[in-house]
Amino acid sequence: DAGVIQSPRHEVTEMGQEVTLRCKPISGHDYLFWYRQTMMRGLELLIYFNNNVPIDDSGMPEDRFSAKMPNASFSTLKIQPSEPRDSAVYFCASSLLGDTQYFGPGTRLTVL
Amino acid sequence: DQQVKQNSPSLSVQEGRISILNCDYTNSMFDYFLWYKKYPAEGPTFLISISSIKDKNEDGRFTVFLNKSAKHLSLHIVPSQPGDSAVYFCAVSYNTDKLIFGTGTRLQVFP
């Protein structure tokens, strides 16, 4: 299996622009997680889905962030409008039955 | 407020010696504990885990110790190798599918 796939790997944008991060989980996995990594706060869980349904979005920082999972093989995390403080590495992870989480390579977002 | 703390942001160890990474948590209800390892430009990968019914779990050079009374978790790597140089995250969970991660400790193993 190819593992969790994320795109783009790097994104540089200007403040106020919309940013969309994409994730393809491992085939057959029923959980999908979005994390953000910063130096100060480490790995923070933003939101997770089970069978395409959002279960817990309490980590989403504010209304500018939204996530969708239209089907079992695709999810997006959108930031609109983006701000410099959103600069971080965003990871997607998937798991089977809530067991071990497998992470993608991450998207490094820079908001100027 | 951080529920999981890794108070040492970095650790430097000589090759062949023991590396000890530490993690403290605040909630005694946490019942599952994990360590993840992360190389630059890659996502974290699962390393080893332990449930609250045990106090030690070993996998090759890696051993995780759990001290529930102290709410303390540690990872021992013996012997340390240069390829172990990475960022190590501890994570905890309680009867749920989601994990809470610490801020990570950067381990450098030098020859």
Image (cartoon, coloured by chain):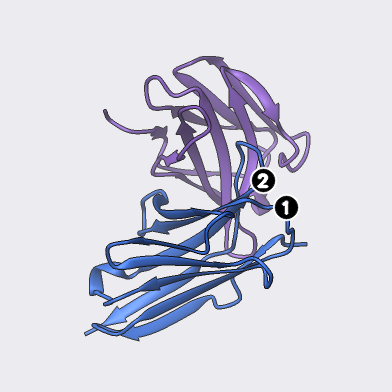
Judge whether A7 appears above or below A73 on screen: below
Residue at screen point 43% across, 41% down: A103
> Could you tell me which secondary element the residue under label 2 belongs to?
loop
> Could you tell me which secondary element the residue under label 1 belongs to?
loop
Instruction: Where is residue B8? Give x, y as percent.
Output: 55, 78
Instruction: Please name whichever residue, A112 or A76, is drawn nearer the observer in this view of the structure.
Output: A76
- Residue lying at the far left in this picture: please name it: B111
* Mark 2 residue type: Tyr
Instruction: Where is residue B79? Give x, y as percent.
Output: 26, 77
Q: Chain of mark 2?
A: B
> Which dot marks residue B94?
2
Q: Is residue B92 visible?
A: yes
Residue at screen point 63% across, 51% down: B31
Judge whether A110 appears above or below A22 on screen: below
Q: Are marks 2 and 1 in contact (CB under 8 Å)?
A: yes
Residue at screen point 40% across, 57% down: B38
